[in-house]
Image (spheres, coloured by chain):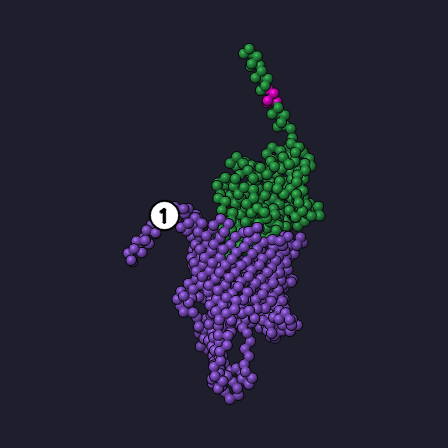
Amino acid sequence: MKRLILTISVLWAISVCPVLAQDSIPTDNGISWGGYLQANECLRLKGRNNYSWQEYRWVLKAEVKPTTKSHFYGELWVRTWGGSNVMNTTDLTDKDKVSPGNIELKEAYVDFYGFLFEKLDLRIGKQRIAWGTADKLNQTDNLNPKDLEEIWDFGRHLGSEGLKASYYLGDYTLTAVYIPLFTPAVLPRGDWASVLSPSMELPAGMILKSRTDIVSLPRNNPEESSTAGLQMSKNLLGYDLSLSYIYGRDDLPIASEISLVPAGASGEVDITSELMYPRRRIVGADLAGTVANVGIWAEAAVVFPDRATMVTDLSAFGLGIQEMTVLDDEPYAKYVVGGDYTFKNGIYVNGQYLHGFIHERGKENLEDYFMFRMERKFLEEKLKIAPIGGGVEIKNTNDIKNNYAVIYTPEISYKPVDNAEITLGLRIFEGKNTTTFGRVKDNNEACLKVEYSF
Amino acid sequence: MKITNTRFLLALSAIVIFTQCLTQAQPLNNPVLILNKVDDVINAPKDQDYKVKLVLIDSKGNEKEREMSMLQNGSDKRVVKFLSPADQKGIAFLSLPNDMMYLYLPAFKKTRRIASHVKNTNFAGTDFTYEDMEAIRYADKWVPDLARSENNKYVLQLSPKAAGLSDYSKLVMTVRADNFYPERIEHYNKSGKLCKIMTRDGIEQISGYWVCTESQMEDLKTKHKTRMIMTDMKLDSGIPDDKFTERFLTR
């Protein structure tokens, strides 16, 4: 049997290689280098004006097109974080704590164009697969894990090691994706860590002393860890349409076990929790087009989650063990509808209505958001002013007065020379504590970003 | 009899030559015919493949450069890819018939459909709008009127065939009578005011086709100019139709 497989493999290799070689025309063996340098500083507007974000990023991109049938792309981020994580003298000997930083391989993949068949393209390696037609807040973009490290960089995802095959059949494009290993989402960093976490309410008389948690990743095998996706897209009557299906896991954790243990006489408790990533299937659809000169888009994702339960161990208090459902297996739909328009005077407006923000799940937990932006360029496009930008969050439409938040994010950008851009922006929050963004109303901040591309 | 035949043939030849000369010297007075000839001349190559250097000149004379590669198939399909500057490298634009436009943004790994409202906005900081960058046949969008004919040039006034087809209220096109190549196009805004002038300097024959290798668009309000210099021009090189698809836009 092994010999048969080996023989077939050799025959396949012999038959395929000449085909690839014949069709490949050498282009340029040289590597094309590029990238950018970015400095990003944010400062709280309240209190003692602490720095809320400091990041220095050097992005290096390399690209090679050795033949017309192949292509390599790699992107590396080298970063340092401002400030030190030094807590004691021992830490002073640790460079990672004195001057924290990291190196991240964002993408590294090879493309084979016309692989085996003229109409088949294959991409292998660590890659970003961006699905959806909406502006940055894409409900159908669920293959790569979310990278919420800088929460305001909407749409940022990690790259995933995997395989993408695209087949072009007339007007149709069929895409199949396979990602062997599960990678969880990166949660917000620094002061923003709590913004996407639901507030925890302890029983009356209990005070939290310490909290530890264990993250339980899926087993490291194809059955438990893999993600697979299919997409079919087509232009129909002037509209770009696509349908998709994803079988994978939610990349944001959910608590599966919580244990409370007394830690003192005055009602203090230690909490230990275990987090897991529930299985889910997602059916998606999106469209983009034009209606009366206005650009429009819509995306919907119907999520079919596995039921997730949470066991709460209160036996140390004589209350036994309780089990409750934290995520029902009832399907729920997240969607976004939006449009943009440029007026004759150059003012650009963009608005999107979302049902369900990036971190929300479960039919009962989806909120409504309206995101908007207005901008105009001046001085031969060197200066861009966005005086209006941000969003409105409504947690409960029946009681808006007590369930709203407003986010205001004006921005001004200036390009002093080619390839350089300086951006100054504000983030102002107002709202009720019941809402996601209302909870961070003390986090108002001003940010300065300088970027130079090369 | 032989002499009579010879005389007859000579007379006939003289009539034919005289008629031809008359025809050549006779200027055309049918604007639709002239515009169709313009379309035929500028879209004569089956396909075009060339590099473009854009020189952006501000009102003080400061210059900035951009480089692009451009592919065109027939008169209605065009792909533009930015080669420089660094912050725009890799951005690609696809223009297809029926106002279908796509923009590939490498930073987001995404191809975005562009709505027709962007047609009046400047293309990547140049004085050309997305509408100016479209590959079209003028006769499909404009109704011509012959304003005048002088110095071996035709001056056509073009009005949109229907409301909403263009962001310009009219174009005034100066066409060379010898080869029907448009060498100057005045663009009028919706208020009827002259806003931009496009001039073509390097009109020459390559591979038997009349092509323009250097043109300039000037914005009269901002006094900003964009000079477009075409190099490495390849005509009729057999560019396959599937190069004008989203599949190739991302490569």
Q: Quadrant of the N terminus of chain B?
A: top right
Chain in purple? A
Q: Residue at x 47, y 70 (%)?
A: A277
Q: Which chain is mark 1 on? A: A
The residue lying furthest to the front in this view is A330
> Which x, y percent locates residue A216?
44, 72
Q: Residue furthest top?
A: B1
Q: Please check the rendered image and state whether residue B15 is part of the magenta-colored stretch, yes or no.
A: yes
Residue type pointed to by label 1: Pro
Colour for chain B in the figure: green
Q: Residue at x 43, y 58 (%)?
A: A163
Residue to which mark 1 is pinned: A18
Residue range highlighted in magenta: B14-18
Q: Residue at x 43, y 70 (%)?
A: A217
Magenta stretch containing residue B141, yes or no? no
Viewer-proximal residue among A36 and A136: A136
Question: Which secondary structure, mark 1?
Answer: helix
Q: Image height check: is A404 above or below B117?
A: below
Place of residue A373 in the rendered image (x, y in percent of width and height, measured from the top left): 62, 61
Whether A189 is drawn above or below B5: the answer is below
Report the residue at 44% width, 77% height from top. Answer: A90
Measured as percent of width and height from the top left, residue B171 is found at 66, 42
Find the residue positioned furthest to the bottom: A265
The answer to whether residue A102 shows anywhere in this view is no
Tell me where residue A260 appears, x and y as whole percent: 49, 82
